[in-house]
Each structure stands twice: as structure tokens, then as C-alpha cells.
Amino acid sequence: MTGTPLAVIVLAAGQGTRMKSTLPKMLHQIGGRPLIGHVLATAGELSPESITVVVRHERDLVAASVVAAVPDARVVDQDDIPGTGRAVQVALDALGAFEGDVLVLSGDVPLLETDALHDLLATHRQTAAGATLLSALLDDATGYGRVVRGEDGSVSRIVEQKDATPDEAAVREINAGVYVFHAPALRAHLAQVGTNNAQGEMYLTDVVGLMREASLTVSATLAPDASTALGVNDRVQLAEAARILNARIVRHWQLEGATILDPATTWIDADASLAADVTVLPGSHILRATTVASGAIIGPDTSLVDCEVGEGATVRRTDATLAVIGAGATVGPFAYLRPGTELGAAGKIGTFVETKNSVIGERSKVPHLSYIGDTTIGTGVNLGAGAITANYDDVTKHRTVIGDEVHSGSHNVFVAPVRIGDGAKTGAGAVIRKDVPPGALAISVAPQRNVEGWVEQNRPGTGAAAAVAKARSAQKADDGAQEEEDR
């Protein structure tokens, strides 16, 4: 039966009331993906003939997320008949005359691993079962359906929490909501399922009892790791699932050669990638599709979202989104890289620097206390402390272009649109409103004017006026002493 075709059905119609959220439960995220995204990714690794997702609550939002993850997935709608059995029934109708194996997954069980599903399918096919389910042993099985076994150890039925007797509720083996069925048997026995239960729902689990009554084999595979079977029904379980997933991801990258000093405070999303010899220091978040090349050092206390970090780069105490950081570059501490930032090899974005939609060339430095927005900077540039590219005129964003080997003085403001030629210099405190030719020195200097007595005249009675009076008295005493000495 190894060549038996496989179809996957994902149940994603539930409202998830215990989440107490306007966002559908299936779209709450862990590891940078919605819950259902993890389930779909795992399903795709099995190379099924088709993936069908059953939706209902906030169907358009859920359907959009499904299609974004698996463009060729089939989305079907559950009707007014409640229950997992009805959800699978409408999906089977969409599969037409499919005669192979049907794997049923729950969209809110995101920690399933491919190996567990391969084992489940192998057991199902080796035992020629009508149905095979995945189970797990939990110390606290509250909220889960219980797996009730017969005297021979085979599965006799599954009892939902609200329908369980005290003895059944004491069972620790739970139903993970993951099943494989032989399609014709599933189709035939679903037609016999009713809604005579505490919830008034059409339970998929009732198919197990019906198959047993028909003398079909019902098998079960016990998950080696109970966390694999954990569902998400509330925010507490969401956080726990996120923690477990993150621990898996961190361990994976450690085994691939990355040094992660404090796994408990390091968060890495499922789509992020770390090369060998990367070092991640405590308190760092490597999120979405961020890639970090060999030898880079990330952290401490750094957040990277959809970033690309080159070989040997160092990023400390930095918040960056959609930024490219070149090989050997340094960023931080306390830097803020907004989308569109590109820092060239061996470049520097330093302390308390914010950048946005700007390209900073190789070996160029913006060391401290600066804002660089909508700017192109050449190679070998050094901008003095307090540099600002004033890119917005209250109507339109404009661009600043700074050539190669430009060195600016401290506290410069470049009022865009403006172009600074190669090798040019600017003086301290300059406000640059006009283009600067290559090799020129640009200064904007006004003569300093001191208005004597201004504080006494305009701020009488203040601390400053008192300090002035004290200074004048001291100066007068010094002058008198000097005159006495001169005599």
C-alpha cells in the first residue's frame, strides 16, 4: 500500500471563542507564521495529491492565509451543520471519487512534525486499517478527547470531554485530532454519524466506533513527544506552543553550528536562517525571513525582522526591519534601521542613529546621533555627529546624494534635494541647502554677536540672573585686587 495516493484535509472552521479575539484562532501566530501555516507546511512535506481546507468563521481571512501559504490548496466551506464530522464530509464531497488515504489534520495543532505523520501513515498502511489516529499521553488531559481502548489494547472509541464518564475522564491518553482514513470507509461511515451528543455536533470521532462495529481495524500511533499533539485553544496554550516551537528551532540551529548563548531569551522564527559560526547573544529576536551569514554576531538585545546580515557583521542592541547589512559592517548599539536601509561592507551605523530608505556605501560611517532618510551615500564617507538629511518638505519626500570620500562636520543638516560631490567637505554646524561641487568646502557661518546684559534685562529674578550677579561681583573683586597689586 506504499503507493496509495494521499489527500490531506485541514479543519479550520472553528471560531476559537476561548482566544477572546477578533482575529480567527487559526491566524494567531507562533514562530512568525499563523497556526494554520505551520500545519500546511507540514502537510506539504508529505507531497500529497491535494490539500483541502475547510473554513467557516471569518472565512475570507482564513482562506486568504491558506492561499498565500499554499496557492493550489482547495478551500471549501462548512455549512450550518456543526462538528468535525460534517467538516470532513464537505471536504470529501470536494474530493469526488478519490479512493486513497485521507489524512485529517487540525489547523490549531501547529507542532506536528513530519516524522510523526510518516509513522502514522506507515502504521495505517501496514495494518490495512480503516482508520488510524495519533494519540499522546498527557498528565493533564483536560479539554481533549480521550482514547478508550478495548481489552486487547485496540482503539474502541474516542470520547469527548463533555461526554466522558468519570472513569473515561481519568484516561491520560488523548486524541490529537490527527487521523488517517481509507477514503471509501470514511465516506460510508460518515453517512451514519448523527448529532446525538452534549454538543449537538456531528463528531468525526464517532466514525471510530462505527468502524469498530463494522469489524474494521482501528489503529493508533502514540506520539513519542506529547508536545507534538498539543492544540491551541487559548492564549496560555498559544504561548506554550510558541515556547516549544522556539526551543526546537533554537536547538536546530545550534546543531547546525550556530552559537546561541541563552536559548531562553533568544527567539528565532521558522523562516529565519543562520549559517555556521553565527553567534547570537542574549535577548535577541531573529524574525520572519531574516538570514544571518557566517561569523556574524547578533546582540545582545537585538531585533531583526526580514533582514539580511553579511559575513562577519556585528549588530548590537539594534532594532532593524527590512534592512541589508553588509559583510564586516557594524551596527549599534542603540541603532534603528527602518525598511530600505542598505549598509555596505565594512560600513558603520553607530549609536543613536536612525536610517530609512537609504543606501550607505562600503566603508562609510554614520557614527552617532544622526538621522539618515531617503539618502544615497557613496564609499569611504564619514558623517559627523548629529548629521541630519532633511528629506521632507511637508508635502513631498526628497533625496540627498552624498558622493565618495565626503567628510562632514558635526551637526550638519542636508536639506534635500541636495547633492554633495565626491571628496567635498562641510564645516561644523553647516546647513547645506545647495549642491556642493566635488572637492569644495561648504560652510554656512554667521558672525557671532554677544548682547551684553540681556539676562539681567529680560530675565530678572531668575537663577540665571543671580548667577550673573555673582559672576559680576567676583569679576569686580578680581579686578579690584588686580588694580591694588598693580599699584
Image (cartoon, rainbow, N blue to C red):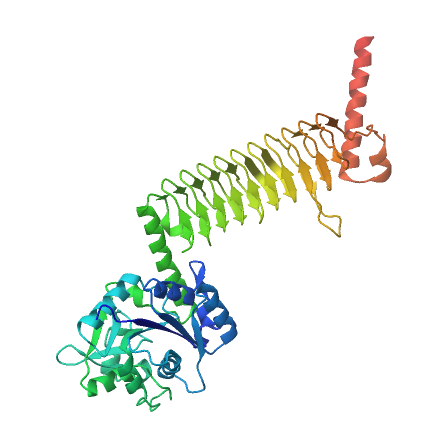
388 or 288: nearer the viewer = 288
**In the image, residue 197 above or below residue 44:** below
**In the image, residue 309 above or below residue 45:** above
Q: Is residue 216 visible?
A: yes
384 relative to 139 in the view: left or right: right
Quarter residue 75 falls in: bottom left
371 relative to 332 in the view: left or right: right
Q: Residue furthest right?
A: 457
126 or 360: nearer the viewer = 126
Quarter residue 34 falls in: bottom left
Identity of the residue drawn at 20% across and 77% down: 129
Residue 406 at x, y percent in the picture:
65, 29
Say which quadrant the C terminus sits in: top right
Residue 45 at x, y percent in the picture:
34, 62
Q: Is residue 164 visible?
A: no
Say which quadrant the N terminus sits in: bottom left
Identity of the residue drawn at 71% across and 29% down: 428
Quarter residue 279 falls in: top left
